[in-house]
Image: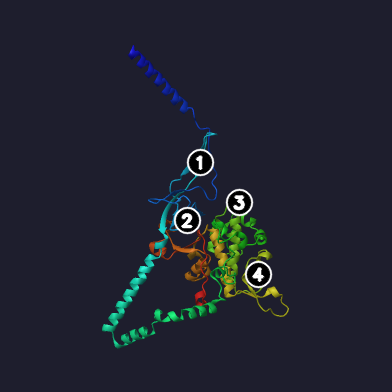
Amino acid sequence: MTEEKNARKRKHRHSKDKEKKRTKSEHTLGTVDVKVESSIPTFLATFPGVSVPEDTTFQAYKGPKEQYVIHGETERMEYDGQNDPDEDIYYVGVYDPNTRTVELMHAPVMNTSRTIKAYKNKGVAAVKQVNVQNRVQMTALGEAFGTKKAKKVISDLERNRIEAEKLESYADSIVDNIKTATENLPSADALREQPSEERPIPPCNEDADDLVNIYPLEGLVSKEEFGAIRVGAIFREQDEKKRVSLLPFKTSEYINNRVAKINNENEMQKLKLLYYAALLMGLYNNRRVSNKRALLQKLNHPAEILVNGLIEKFTESKAGKVGKEKDASFTITPKKEDRLLCYLFAICLRIDEYIVETPALTGELSLRPTRVQDLFRALGCKIRPCSSAQKEALGLTTAEAANYKLATLSLPFKLPDVARRKRTAQSRR
């Protein structure tokens, strides 16, 4: 009788378990929604061996080709991370129990590293200390075994050395004199906000969180000028040579190769940018022309508003001869020439998705590589060598790749300090 009761209990428990499993299996999802990715998506960040405080805030920046960078810091630490666009794609699923739906969001994986703020400059201090010790040892060797001339140099340096202890009583007077002498000097912020006469670059947004917004299109070409660029005939022309003949400057391989590849109506804005870049190249190659009528002819007769814009932005009025209009005579000064090239390079960055091969422009403009690189640096670019993948894609040998530089605009964006030195005519070439 007891065995029969136990068997009945086991059978009842088994039926209950089956009913629970059946009930669980019935809770299926209703729908699965995939969220449209925003400009800055959700991130999955890895912090190996690090416990990050919960109140740490991070800022995200978007680069070209799905490249993202994050940066955060606390009172003692800095955290930096970036993703690898070639890695597997990850999604984060958010389940809503009320509607029984799952929302999937693209989440790049950020590989992070940390830096202790207090130790950032420790290595520099150690190097300086080593240099001091080496100098003391070299001085001792020179005094013991040096020639008369070497010993005289050492004694002169020792005699002219300033000892800080002897100047303590004059410290207040020195500080006051320095304050008086420097009170009218511009601050670091004022220097960073130099007008365009000092910085030859187009208007820029230093707080931009997207590369497209660093140099806005309206700052490169006004709306009126951009609307006056007509490229319908160029787009409809199928013959490559005839396409080139419609451009304002016809001998640029950089422009011609890119124009030949445009065959989609969605690329009309890019075609307009290429047309304007050809205008700037034409103006640079005809920079000795000082007459508006002659310039119109050299540039294949573009819309007059475009030529007026070029003259206004990149030239200075010259004392005209009697009977000539005021705007008919102009000249391109060295400063205006730098400005013209910076506008051209900023448009090239936009055309080439913010990675420009500098050798192509160096050859076409007959400029020294150092000058081209300096102007790209003035725009906030970093000059980098080719990676292995880029070297293979461009078909370069190892020797060629060593001197093949790329100008890259990336985030976070920072303009370089203004260099306060006069450039010689030789360095401008």
What distance separates the C-alpha of mark 4 from that of mark 2? 41 Å
Q: In terms of sequence position, does the residue under pointer 4 or pointer 2 come before the other?
A: 2
What amino acid is at disc 2?
A: His
Q: Nearer the viewer, residue 209 or 354?
A: 209
Tag count: 4
What distance separates the C-alpha of mark 2 from that of mark 1? 25 Å
Q: Nearer the viewer, residue 42 or 383?
A: 42
What distance separates the C-alpha of mark 2 from that of mark 3? 38 Å
Image quarter where the N terminus lies is: top left
What distance separates the C-alpha of mark 3 from that of mark 4? 32 Å
> Which residue was labeled with disc 1?
104
SS of the residue under disc 1: strand
> Which residue was labeled with disc 3?
265
Determine the residue positioned at 66% across, 77% down. Answer: 318
Please state which of the two labelled residues, at mark 1 or mark 3, is closer to the viewer: 1
- Give the image location of residue 354, x and y in percent: 52, 59
Q: Are marks 1 and 3 in contact (CB under 8 Å)?
A: no
Please state which of the two labelled residues, at mark 2 or mark 3, is closer to the viewer: 2
Position of 320 with respect to 161 (left or right) is right
Please state which of the two labelled residues, at mark 2 or mark 1, is closer to the viewer: 2
> Which residue was labeled with disc 4?
312
